[in-house]
Structure formats: structure tokens, C-alpha cells
Amino acid sequence: MQSNSKDSRGNFPAPTAQTSGIPTATSNDELIPALRVKNLRFYYGSQKALEGISMDIYRNQITAIIGPSGCGKSTFIKALNRIGELEGKVRVEGTVTFFGQNIYGRRVNPNRLRRHIGMVFQKPNPFARSIYDNVAYGVRLMGRRSKAQLDEIVESALRSAALWDEVKDKLHQSAYGLSGGQQQRLCIARALAVKPKVLLMDEPCSALDPIATMRIEELLQTLRQELTIVIVTHNMQQASRISDYTAFFSTDESRIGQLVEFGLTPKIFTEAIQERTRDYVAGRFG
């Protein structure tokens, strides 16, 4: 059993190498799981949405989640930082551990957890505030900061999101004045400002044009040096371009989301074991 302890300040444990009975997608012993999912079942009320999901999400890697609509992809990533609980009454069975700690443990504070495991949604959702205040919002909730500290954090987050040069002269203008692609990068900057270890992304490019999509993909390749990234995408080309690992989800006859296959992205797209995976990535169904 993995430890559920936190340090004396209530922080999550530092990353360490671990072993478990969960099958891994690689034999590379140097990879460290940031998140380990074991026998995850997720219910909205009495309706089961996910059945028995087990997989590792590796540190500083990009993991793509693919599959047809309604197969539980978004539900799965919402279970990884407990944001699904904000959508109503839910029930979770199995475990999700974050660097060894069960995130559904009784003593875990979901708000603190979400600072470590951030999320960017399908459509850009900037607040009705200035560009500066959007980025500073989460930092202010964490405690008091001097103006100089906030300035430094905001600039650093915007630079990390490859947006600083485009907005540095209009930080106190409304975020709604930005283009769709800029708004999405602003939402990424807002998530980065609180220094997460994992970034979850639910189809972040689906509402963007090809040029804005390319900017986001280039950004993710840079961010993976510091973060673990999980991205839900319907775009097979995008998944094959940017991800290290791919998980294919589908449904059974009861329309319950299941993990069909998980592995290194090149293997999933060229040498998948399951026929359903091969059919899906080839565009023969879904």
C-alpha cells in the first residue's frame, strides 16, 4: 500500500520512484509516475461513467487521451484532480495516487490538490478581469504577495505561456480583448502561475484555428520540460505529433468508459495490439 502521508505543512510528497502491480507502458526504469491510476470506477450519481481504469502517467511526459465521444475521456481527467466533484454528486472507487498519495484520501484538501494539478478547458475561459488580474488570481488566493512579487509571477507565467511579448504593454486591459488563441494561452498562464506539477488539458485546441493550434502545440513541447501534461484530443494527428504516450478509451455495450489500450504513442498508432485501437486510429470507426 502506498503512503497517504503529507509533510508537517500539509504539502504533497516530493517525487520518488515507485513500483506497483499496475502494468507500465515501457521498460524504462528511469521514468517516474506522477499519477498512478488503479481500478478507477467513477459514478455520476448511480450512473457509472468509467470502469476499472488502470494506467501510469509519467513525469515530464505528454500523455494523450483519445477515443470516440462519450467514452469518458473528460470524466477521466476530471477525476485526476477531483474537479468532477464540482459537477454534482459523484462516487469514486479504486485509487488515484499523486507521487504516492491517494488524492481521494480523507485528509486531502481538493483546493490544495488543484494547485498542484491544474486544468485548462476546451474553450478559453478568461475571467472578466484584466490580463494581469487573470494571471494573478490564483496566486492571490494562496496568500498575500507584494506588488513586486506579483509582477514577477505574472511576467514569468506569461513568458512560460509564450504570451508576454504580445501583452506586456496592455496588462491592465480586459482579457476579453485577446484573440481566441491568446485567451487560451492566458488560461495556461493562469494555471502555470501557481506552479503546478501536472497540467490537464481537455481539448484545448478544438476551438482554435490551425495557426493558434500550432502555437499551443509548440508551447506544450516547451512546458513538458517542467510539467507532466495530460491532453484529451479528438485530433489523431495532434496526438501522434505531440504525445509520448497514448491511452485509447472506448465504451462497452453498456456505454461505460473503458481503457482499451495504453502505450508509447508510436506503438499505439502503428502497432496497436487491440483491433479496436487499430480501427480507431485508422479512422474506421468513431
Image (cartoon, grey):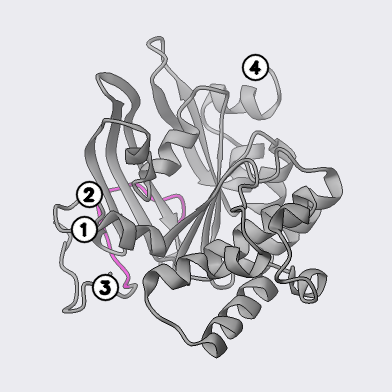
Q: Amino acid at mark 2?
A: Tyr
**Residue that badge 2 annotates:** 104
2 or 3: tag closer to the N-terminus: 3
Q: CA distance from mark 3 to mark 4?
A: 44 Å
Q: Which residues are magenta?
A: 16-27
**Residue that badge 1 annotates:** 108
Kindly state the secondary structure of the residue where label 2 is placed: loop
3 or 4: tag closer to the N-terminus: 3
Examine the rendering and report whether any part of residue 227 can be seen.
no
Task: Tell me if residue 181 is in the magenta stretch.
Answer: no
Kindly state the secondary structure of the residue where label 1 is placed: loop
Nearer mark to the viewer, of 2 and 4 = 2
Nearer mark to the viewer, of 1 and 4 = 1
Q: Nearer the viewer, residue 242 or 178?
A: 178
Name the residue: 31% across, 64% down.
99
Q: CA distance from mark 1 to mark 2?
A: 7 Å
Q: Nearer the viewer, residue 223 or 107?
A: 107
Q: Amino acid at mark 1?
A: Val
Q: Quadrant of residue 203?
A: top right
Task: Tell me if residue 23 is in the magenta stretch.
Answer: yes
1 or 4: tag closer to the N-terminus: 1
**Residue that badge 3 annotates:** 11
Q: Which mark is residue 285?
A: 4
The answer to whether the residues at label 3 and label 4 have Cβ atoms under 8 Å apart is: no
Q: Amino acid at mark 3?
A: Asn
The answer to whether the residues at label 1 and label 2 have Cβ atoms under 8 Å apart is: yes
Q: Which mark is residue 279?
A: none
Residue at the far right in the pictured view: 211
Q: Amino acid at mark 4?
A: Phe
